[in-house]
Amino acid sequence: MKKRLILPILALMLLGSCKNDEKILNSLSDYNMTMQSKGYHFGDKINLPKDITENAESIAISFGDKETKNLTIDPKYFTLGDNAVSFIIQLKNGESLTQDATINVYAKHPEKSIQYSIIKEYPHNPNNFVQGFQLEGNTIYESDGQHGTSQILKYNLGDTKAIASSAQSEDIFSEGATIVGDKIYQLTWQNKKGFIYNKSDLKLISEFAYPNMIGEGWGLAYDGKDLLLSDGTKNIYFINPNDPSKVVKTISVAGNNQVYDQLNELEYHKGYLYSNVWRKPIILKIDTKTGEVIGKIDLTEIAKKHQKGEDDVLNGIAFKGDNMLITGKNWPAIYEISLQ
């Protein structure tokens, strides 16, 4: 008789335990979904609901290759933007529960709206699918994309005729480019390599492989020491131009209430990185020390004059003194704007 009673009791205990586990996981899911849209800032506490903490012996957050029991948004573990994590909860009854989550970390201060005025308009070859764009003196150096037509070229600002150019093979889709001393560095989209040219005549000097962590080449800039490379994610990779197969450091980019990815054509100017966002008529001003977006230029009024489809988007940033030059893919114009 006693044996017959034990099985139903165990079944009830197991059922109760399962319901409690489900309640804890549902509570954790609801909390994380709420906080995913609200976001955190560095230094914030992760204040899990009481029905989780009161039943937990310990709570850890796993990032795959590292783990912490400190429920604080610590830059030692978290980056700006979206962080894919797993919560590991050891219950007081000895059970272990795991749940995946996304923790968004935003910049503490709202990004400033940067106003501008148009100073001058220059012609631009509408056949150029702009991927990289920079100015030195009165010379534009431009990387143009698309399979079969990719090239690096240079021309005088105010003219559209190339002074020099170097075409890529049909399997290459050119991406960002930047000036480093007497050389031009140029990325490719999915070929996992870049090119280095003589600046004077655009003759190819050598090639370099991307670091393994970089999937694609998008934008490229130079801060006087390192190459700054974007790969379509929220990350900016700092790479030694003398050894471009290795990453020196990485920053992640986010605003006060938004994660930014698809960072495209890049330009470095006076301590800040400026970035196009693919298919958006905006340019971000990014603090290169933290990855925080501190300013945003809304160029909708200019972009809508030229954007007729998905591809002819704003993509091209250079500086002429403190004025900015902007253009886009297949645009017939380059604009010089004064930033307020």
Image (spheres, rainbow, N blue to C red):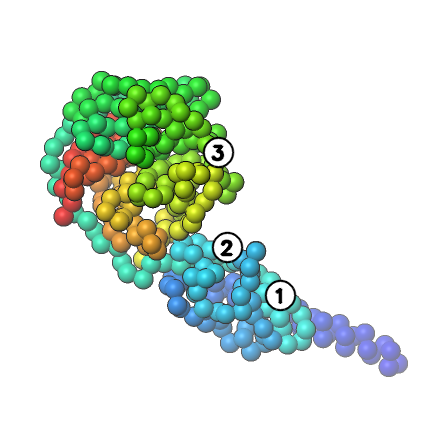
Looking at the image, tell me whether mark 3 or mark 2 is earlier in sequence order.
Answer: 2
Of residues 220 and 302, the one drawn nearer to the viewer in this rendering: 220
| Residue in view at x 22 percent, y 32 percent | 136
Q: Is residue 42 above or below residue 50?
A: above
Please indicate whether residue 102 sits to the left or right of residue 174 in the image: right
Q: Which residue is mark 1?
A: 97
Of residues 174 and 315, the one drawn nearer to the viewer in this rendering: 174
Q: Which residue is mark 2?
A: 84
Dot 3: within a 10 Å radius of its alpha carbon, few (fewer than 14), some, or many (20 or more) residues? some
Dot 1: within a 10 Å radius of its alpha carbon, few (fewer than 14), some, or many (20 or more) residues? some
| Residue in view at x 48 percent, y 29 percent | 191
Three-letter amino acid code at the position of disc 2: Ala
Three-letter amino acid code at the position of disc 1: Leu
Q: Is residue 270 above or below residue 6?
A: above
- How far apart marks 3 and 2 lie (CA) works out to 28 Å
Please state which of the two labelled residues, at mark 3 or mark 2, is closer to the viewer.
3
